[in-house]
Image (cartoon, rainbow, N blue to C red):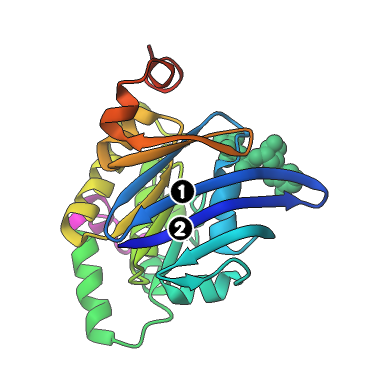
Amino acid sequence: MTLLELDAVRASYGKVQVLQDVSLSVPDGGAVGILGANGAGKTTTLRAISGTVNVRGRITFDGIDITRSGPEKVASLGIAHVPEGRGTLPNLSVRENLRVGAYLRKDRRGIAQDIDFVLELFPHLERRIGQNASTLSGGEQQMLAIARAFMAKPRLLVLDEPSLGLAPSTSQDVYDSIQRLRDESGIAMLVVEQNANLAFRIVESATVLETGHSVLSGTVEELKGRDEIRKAYLGG
Ligand code: ATP
């Protein structure tokens, strides 16, 4: 079953149209990547889904039209967005950040269980549970942002360049954590990533964006077999 579907999506900032024609779909429980160069429109595609930019075309989530839904509505339907730059709350502890992620939930036992669950998956965070988020390393902050988004109990986790600004070995650690989260929870994911080698560790398929158009989609195997993908995104 399809969980999220974008059909011929267009989006503009003021008069500047940035997305021209983006179509993609995420199956329920599946993981899909969005690849593309700087400025191709990857972040704007995620903003279109989250309801923070004006959209034409059609976006559906679990069969519901969310094309014109605002961010609160989209979040309440079960889409959690981890933005570029992470957005953790610097003056709150790791535990408090995780609780903030669950603020729309009422099930106190479920929240406590999910905190235990994410701490098991993210041992880096467990070691820093009482520390302010501002004292964490870049990789730990990224893990906290992902864990916090998961605490909302979403059906779809949307991740914008989890490796941005991180050293290669730290990026690997972050992707290890994402992979564990996916394996253990079965949650659907949509992941923007410039580094296809990283994205291909966790997604089953991907869409390539060029200047606001989705130009190519396929399974990881199909994409790895294409020369232009190997050259542009896999280092030759
Ligand atoms: P990057 O990897 O650099 O973030 P991207 O593929 O995510 O690239 P977007 O951030 O979606 O690309 O940007 C697509 C285009 O929209 C770019 O040309 C960018 O300059 C422009 N753009 C992004 N944000 C705004 C904004 N708030 N106002 C006007 N133009 C914007």
- Counting labels gives 2
Which quarter of the picture shows residue 92? bottom left
In the rendered image, the quadrant that contains the N terminus is bottom left
**Viewer-proximal residue, 139 or 228?**
228
Which segment did they paint magenta?
Answer: 121-132
Q: Quadrant of ligand 1?
A: top right
Query: With respect to residue 140, does 103 lie above or below?
Result: below
- Find residue 5 and name its label: 2
Mark pair 2, 1: CA separation: 6 Å
The furthest residue to the right: 15
Which quarter of the picture shows residue 98? bottom left
Q: Residue at x 41, y 71 (%)?
A: 78
- Neighbor class of circle 2 (other Cα within 10 Å; few <14, some 14-19, many 20+) is many
- Find residue 24 and name its label: 1
Secondary structure state at the residue bearing disc 1: strand
Q: Residue 54: say if magenta.
A: no
